[in-house]
Amino acid sequence: MAEINKDLDQGRRSFLGSAGTATAAATIAPGVFLTAPAAAKPADQAVSSDNRWGILIDTQRCADGCNDCVSACEDENGWGQANTSEEHSNELQKSQWIRKVSLKEKTTGHVTSLPVMCQHCETAPCVDVCPTGASFRRDDGIVLVDKHICIGCRYCMMACPYKARSFIHEDLKDQKPWAPRGKGTVESCTLCVHRVDEGGTPACVEACTAENHEAMTFGDLNDENSIISRQLKEFGGKEIRADLGLNTGVRYRGL
Amino acid sequence: MSQRSLISKAALFLAAMVTGLPMLAHAGEVPYPTIIEPDQHFSADQECVLPEDEMRRNHMELILHQRDKTVHNGVRTREHSFEECINCHAIKGDDGEYLRVESPKHFCASCHNYAAVKIDCFQCHADVPVRPSKQHNQRSQLKHHDTLRTEKNLSSQTLKLLSTKGKL
């Protein structure tokens, strides 16, 4: 009797499993997918290489002059306009975690606008050159600075091909508890690691989606069913300076 | 100065010390820092995450351990989180604003000034609460070692109820 029940259960389970996969992969229209959000990692569990977090940026949808992702990052992580205590540094010295870049093609005059931040490389030059081990890559692909170890030598700033890192030149006040930052250390985009660890989305992506620009997609590059992976599979996505072979986590469409 | 006068001066100094010391000891005891009690406790039956004497000696070990786990492994349990220390221990001044670490009444400063141990945590970290504590909602969702201590304190009936509701 028990064995019969077991067989029945297994049949039911496998049916539910296949039904679930079918739903998870449902495609409404090209580029529009339905998926359940990934469950958040338990807070006491370490990150693993099962995930590789990345962002896909659609430059066709990124409007020239729109700065929503940059201001969302400022507000979230407390830099730029969101932290007035960095008052002695000039514009070139001030921290910049994410910036908007416009490219104009000379022959046609076509302007492409795109946000550029830390590209979260798999083989990150900043990690290679760091003399103290402060610059490191987490198992899930997020490249960070451990500011407890950073000595502020700025080798990583020189090594980064994307000009993604900044150095803090002066004493700061009123930092966010989830984004500590201070004088004498280098910093850059953290892919909103505090949000990602709790199953969230980076602030820039959230702002872009909230304003209905839909130019940014965040997700797990290792999960072939994630929205970002399926978009990359269908439409492709380029790396900036792909010739360097860094395998970046941030990819661009229409570049 | 001759050797004799030097010796006599030294003897005088010694005599002054010997007679003076007991007077000093009686005049005033070693001053203790004024430590301000936080408004809230870790739980109903526990003041802090560890007993007070352990926290006084080892709080820096807990913070250091948690710091590496959080930065490198993304472990974001709240029990030994630096932010939660601040959330509980921050106190407001007369103007209704939270006291900053520059104030000698700030919880960390009150003891560290006394012990003359300079802390650089607040060059980067927030010294006042910014968002509400996440301690309690996270504790109810955790399954592993972080809740073992609290689970022991619950009655078997409560545990059964929580597990049927999927909260354990």
Image (cartoon, coloured by chain):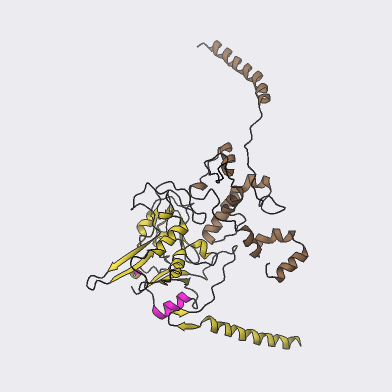
Chain colours: A yellow, B brown
Please, which residue is most extreme toward the left here? Answer: A107
Residue nearest the observer in this picture, B149 or B73: B149
Quadrant assignment for the C terminus of chain B: bottom right
Please state if A211 lies on the left or on the right of A12 as rendered. left
Please, which residue is most extreme toward the front here? Answer: B95
Give how far across and how far down residue A187 sits, in percent: 43, 56
In terms of image quadrants, where is residue B33? top right
Give how far across and how far down residue A112 sits, in percent: 31, 70
| Rendered residue at 56%/64% (across/down) | A46
- Report if residue A118 is visible in the image: no
Give how far across and how far down residue A242 sits, in percent: 35, 70
Please state if B38 lies on the left or on the right of B5 as rendered. right
- Report if residue A78 is visible in the image: yes
**Image vertical order of residue A197 relative to residue A228, above or below:** above
Number of numbered callouts drawn: 0
Residue nearest the observer in this picture, B115 or A208: A208
Answer whether residue A226 is magenta in the image. Answer: yes
Residue nearest the observer in this picture, B69 or A71: A71
**Image vertical order of residue A241 relative to residue A235, above or below:** above
In terms of image quadrants, where is residue B14? top right
| Rendered residue at 41%/54% (across/down) | A81
Residue nearest the observer in this picture, B65 or B128: B128
Give how far across and how far down residue A156 sits, in percent: 39, 57
Q: Which residues are magenta?
A: A225-241
Answer whether residue A16 is magenta in the image. Answer: no
**Image vertical order of residue A31 relative to residue B144, above or below:** below
